[in-house]
Image: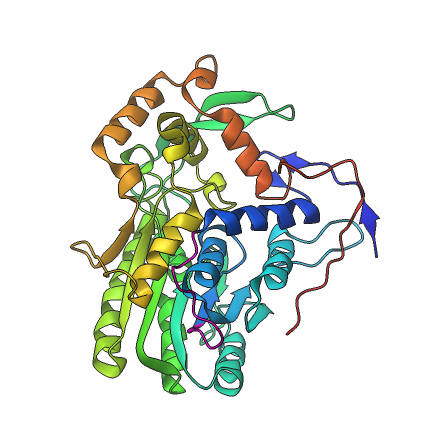
Amino acid sequence: MSERVLMPRNRGFLFLDSHPAGCERLVADVWQACPDAVEVPQGDGPVALIIGSSAGYGLAATVAGLRRAGIRGIMLSFEKAATERRTATAGWYRTADIARAAGRDLVFLNGDAFSDTMKDQVADLIEQRFGGRLDHLIYSVAAPRRVDPDTGTTYASVLKPIGQAYRTKTLAFDDRGVPEVREVETGPAEGDDVEQTVAVMGGADWERWIDRLAGRGLLGEGFTTAALSYIGSPLTAAVYRQGTIGAAKAHLEATARTLNERLDKTVGGRAVTSVNGVAVTQSSTAIPGIALYTGLLRGVLGQKLVPPARQLAALWDQLTGAAPLVLDDEGRVRLDTWELAEDVQAAVAERWEAATTDTIAGIADLDWLHAEVQRLYGFSVPGVDYTAAVATDIPWPTS
């Protein structure tokens, strides 16, 4: 088994390696951050499929589902194994750690969620291993591209404003962790950028999953499904909610309304989008302005910033009936109200205006933000000895 001493190597917010021991400790921390249910079902808990289970909101949904709802079922992600030059991806290690900690009847699949081959593999497992009944489906997919199974066309998503170029403040750290606030300009969407992004990040694949599973008669009575989403602050709206990704999110929400009508008629079920609060994720750090906004928000809220595991615990309570399902006028579960409160947004906006390289350390929680980014890859996790060699070729969990 290959063992190496691993130190963080990064290009901006992108890290080249991940630390297995740090990822293991991080999963344990997420586990502890999620409250247990008063009575977690033992034995045959509800059967769930979580698509995008290894990172971000999807990881939180997996842990919260296990601890809060006692789920069993299938966890699907797309990760890379270790090679001679690189460690495995952080999601690979996190998946192995969840498998060790779960103590539940779980199958972990690694592959392309957009493919019909994977959909059929999942359907076979539900039929053969889980009694032919699926109770819950969580859809949490952030991807750069998607191949349409019907046409073979490859669609690529982009992060661009719509209509005109957008100039915004953003935050960067150099190799020593020194912060810099700078301005960046993002050119507007061109050609079919919007349609391409919607094809990848909208609701088409979510609906295809439901179609495939319903066609096999695998949706249980009262089946619920939720697609995880984000709206965010007016400070980042031009490049996010009002940009190409926002168009995809609007399509996702429209898909939820369509699916909800169908599921209500066929299995007495529900389909919703869950609008989550901000989190430091591998996807969010790629969006101009989001890192700066998140650091400022943490500076305003401190420990009152709600971690993803607690957000998703609240979602599971609503999906399982442990708490009432509360929807806004658009039919969305809102787990972001703490973030978008008027007083909070006003305080963040004031700091945003004041943010420069000289002032940022005093108005944003940069130590927390910088550590959170590193923790995505298993670094800067308290209690881990980073001078010790660790095994990197951890096997994918079997079941």
| Vertical placement of residue 57 versus 373, above or below | below
Residue 307 lies in quadrant = top left
The span picked out in magenta is 35-47
Residue 279 lies in quadrant = top left
Where is residue 300? Give x, y as percent: 35, 26
> Which is more toward the observer, 25 or 88?
25
Where is residue 252? Give x, y as percent: 31, 60
Q: Quadrant of the N terminus?
A: bottom right
Magenta stretch containing residue 44, yes or no? yes
> Which is more toward the observer, 52 or 247?
52
Q: Quadrant of the C terminus?
A: bottom right
Where is residue 324? Give x, y as percent: 23, 61
In the image, farthest residue toward the front:
38
Query: Is residue 204 at least partly visible in the picture?
Result: yes
Where is residue 361? Give x, y as percent: 47, 18
Q: Is residue 66 left or right of residue 84?
A: left
Q: Is residue 108 left or right of residue 5?
A: left
Query: Is residue 191 at least partly visible in the picture?
Result: no
| Vertical placement of residue 361 versus 238, above or below | above
Q: Is residue 259 left or right of residue 201?
A: left
Residue found at x 69% / y 49%: 20
Magenta stretch containing residue 179, yes or no? no
| Vertical placement of residue 186 versus 245, above or below | above
Task: Give the mark count.
Answer: 0
In the image, farthest residue toward the top:
358
Residue found at x 35% / y 39%: 239
Residue found at x 24% / y 56%: 332
| Vertical placement of residue 294 versus 395, above or below | above
User: For the stretch drawn in magenta, what is the main secondary structure?
Assistant: loop
